Image (cartoon, rainbow, N blue to C red):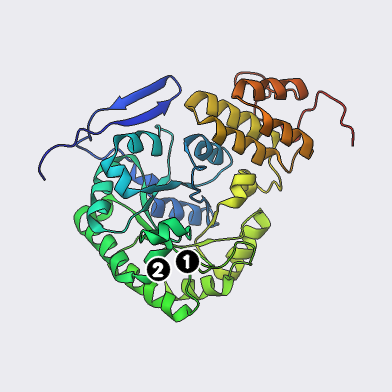
Amino acid sequence: MGEKRNLHFFFFITSGLYQLPRMPSKQLRDPKYRPTEVIKQCQEKGRPAYIAGPMVRYSKLPFRELCRFYDVDIVYTPMILAREFVRNEVARSTDFTTNDSDKCVIVQVGVNNVDDFMKFIEMIHPFVDGIGINCGCPIKEQVREGIGAALMSDPDLVAELIKTAKDKYGDSICIDTKIRIHRDINQTIDFVNKVVEAGTDTLTVHGRTKNTRSSVPVNLDAIKIIRENVTTIPVIANGDCFTLTDFQKIVDYTGVDGVMSARGVLANPALFTGLDKTPWSAVEMFLHLVTAYGLPYKLAQYHLAKLMEDVIPRKYVKAINEKKNMVDIIDYLDEHFDLKRKGDKGFATRIEPPWKIELKV
């Protein structure tokens, strides 16, 4: 195998940062958090899996943990570019942070060749429960690089990625292949058959083509057809899940083993609990996680505004967006709300915003 890699992964824990200087010699993950096992556990509970999908920049560690606070079973990282990750120590230390409670987590990878994919897996697989191949990202810059939705035109490459990884690692890694659909459903079925034969452990289907706008309803018929054609591995539906009612509608129509939400959980991480809007508890918990683990200010600000945009009047969200740092945001929230910290009685338990002021409509 050649030289040992002197890698530098940084892990956020409540007491601060610690650094792992090299790859461990044994697997660190508990097999019960393997995505296929988690899906099986959900089936034993009589329901499909609740899944928070990958979101560029936004599904970092604090948000992943927030989703788990509201019963999400499987959470994805943002897409990480394999080429940058394996070559750049700065990319490794900024693109991926984790801790001991970050389970079940799937790292999503943007990749266009086998060498980068295998190096990426070697570096990261002891610290995640699954590897997700992104064949769905429609961002033009990624597609031009042969990444994301570009892979929907190259099923042989995707199959080679999967087979090469499974030949080396076997069941010690769990691979998810996340796809979009073609205009011709038969082309999608051919694609799916190749990746299933190559050994993908799960299949996630976003029911839109790479050119379909998100404002166009997801194609549940296509997901249903794929589910009917794939009987040996779990199939996950992705697209248009914003409430628990949406979740049940998708499950009832398609028969999938799990439903992934991205935009839905971004706005309301508690959607799988049946709450139709973000509870105040999520705001308090997110603030705690951000201060405990750290997050770039602009990302934290965006998350807070997104969490609260359907909960409080627009002018208050606008005020949050105008703040220049986290201290100013917390001061503003303290001024207008009964904001509790971890350790306070009632922390992260309330549904409605606890206003200190009288609202003027």
Residue type marked 2: Met
On the image, the x and y values in percent for residue 282 come to 64, 35
Q: Is residue 65 visible?
A: yes
Q: Callout 2: 10 Å neighbours few (<14), some, many (20+)?
A: many
In the picture as drawn, the residue positioned furthest to the right comes out as 361
Q: How many marks?
A: 2
Q: Which of the labelled discs sits on residue 180, or is there none? A: 1
Callout 1 secondary element: loop
On the image, the x and y values in percent for residue 333 come to 71, 25
Q: Is residue 35 left or right of residue 302?
A: left
Q: Is residue 291 left or right of residue 162?
A: right
Residue drawn at (54%, 24%) of the image: 291
On the image, the x and y values in percent for residue 59 come to 50, 43
Callout 2 secondary element: helix
In which image quadrant can residue 176 be found?
bottom left
Quadrant for the N terminus, please. top left
On the image, the x and y values in percent for residue 87 come to 26, 42
* Disc 2 to disc 1, C-alpha distance: 7 Å
The residue that label 2 is drawn on is 152
Q: Is residue 332 left or right of residue 161?
A: right
In the picture as drawn, the residue positioned furthest to the left comes out as 2
Quadrant for the C terminus, please. top right
In which image quadrant can residue 199 be found?
bottom left
Residue type marked 1: Arg
Question: Residue 124 or 80: which is nearer the viewer?
Answer: 80
Label 2 close to label 1 by CB (< 8 Å): yes
Residue drawn at (69%, 20%) of the image: 331
Q: Callout 1: 10 Å neighbours few (<14), some, many (20+)?
A: many
Quick one: label 2 or label 1, which is nearer the N terminus?
A: 2
Residue drawn at (66%, 53%) of the image: 243
Q: Is residue 178 visible?
A: no
Is 185 drawn above or below residue 124 in the view shown? Answer: below
